[in-house]
Amino acid sequence: MNFLSDTTAPAHPDLIDALSAANRDFAPSYGADPISARVEARLKEIFETDLKVLFAVSGTASNALALSVLCPSHGAILCHDEAHIHRDERGAPEFFTGGGKLIPLQGDHAKISLGALDRALGEIPEGFVHTSPVRVLSLSNLSESGTAYTPSEVKDRARRVKERPAFVHMDGARFANALVTLGCSPAELTWKAGVDALCFGATKNGALGAEAVILFPSVMDRFEELQARQKRAGHMAPKMRFMAAQFEAWLKDDLWLDLARTANARARALADGFAARNGADVLHPVDGNEIFVRLDDALATRLRKAGAQFYQWPDGSARFVTSWCSTEAEIKAALAAL
């Protein structure tokens, strides 16, 4: 019963098979291979628009690289105080932007509230030499509390910052989990709502290690700069076809959505069990595959003795994360231990 993180899960067999198939022959380097071209074409179909894609090995690399071409060194990036780019990336966005300032905002369930966003925009006037001008709004979907921004919520926030010369970045490490819960299209949750760049994560949803930075038409002209920054940072994989191969298998027949649905269903079943049990208080809406629950000591001990592994969150709660391969038997065993 491993609920530590979806990054602890194995890779899906179809993706491993795709890696083996990509390994059978020679191919051009640095993303100039046929597999990468096919994946970009497939992503254009999925997102219903023209786009450019760059593959990266980690979510931190993709976030930092994307932000580096959206925010100048003298600009500011608005994000939630709990955002991964603020709490868990060791200053990578500041480093890659050359000094771009992260300004953390508040909001329930790790989603930036409109009030907090309006206050920040009001306190940072455009053209005031003493403050870093807002150049990017970063939204995490799923959020760090496992909650999802709806298309209308993304649009409301994007509209406010687009009154400035600013862009919208989406950290989509668990984008698939948010998407299947919301029931909308990828386009509706991204560029149609005002998102300029998406960091599209596969690693947490069945990949061995594969992330993609997607630039939508509004910022496609920055792709060459994005490639240059990836190269200078030492993040440009020579055999990029192996990342592309994972994406090709992941996207085929909407496997990526099926895997997210399984993870979400397991999380929902576990969350329902917690909600029905005295001594377990679920803290946030479960919009994907993460559950944050405050457990009394007796329940936490009982779960650990039964073999359940979970992460102690800094606020004292317990985080349980299901994955594409979490089984109904594991959920039943955890609920039985309760």
Image (cartoon, helix red, strand yellow):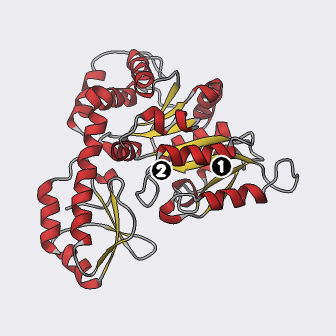
Q: Which mark is residue 149?
A: 2
Is 16 on the left or on the right of 211, as rendered? left
Quarter of the image for the N terminus: give it.
bottom left
Determine whether the residue tagged by mark 1 lies in a helix, strand or loop: helix
Q: Is residue 270 above or below residue 89?
A: below
Residue at the image point whose x is 20% and y is 36% from the top: 13
Quarter of the image for residue 46 reads: top left
Q: Is residue 333 above or below residue 194?
A: below
Mark 1 lies on residue: 95
Determine whether the residue tagged by mark 2 lies in a helix, strand or loop: loop
Residue at the image point whose x is 52% and y is 58% from the top: 111
Q: Residue 275: horizontal and vertical position, in percent? A: 26, 71
Q: How packed is label 1: few (under 14 Cα within 10 Å), some, or many (20 or more)?
A: some
How far apart marks 2 and 1 lie (CA) works out to 27 Å
Q: Residue 86: horizontal and vertical position, in percent? A: 58, 58
Disc 2 and disc 1 in contact, CB within 8 angstroms: no
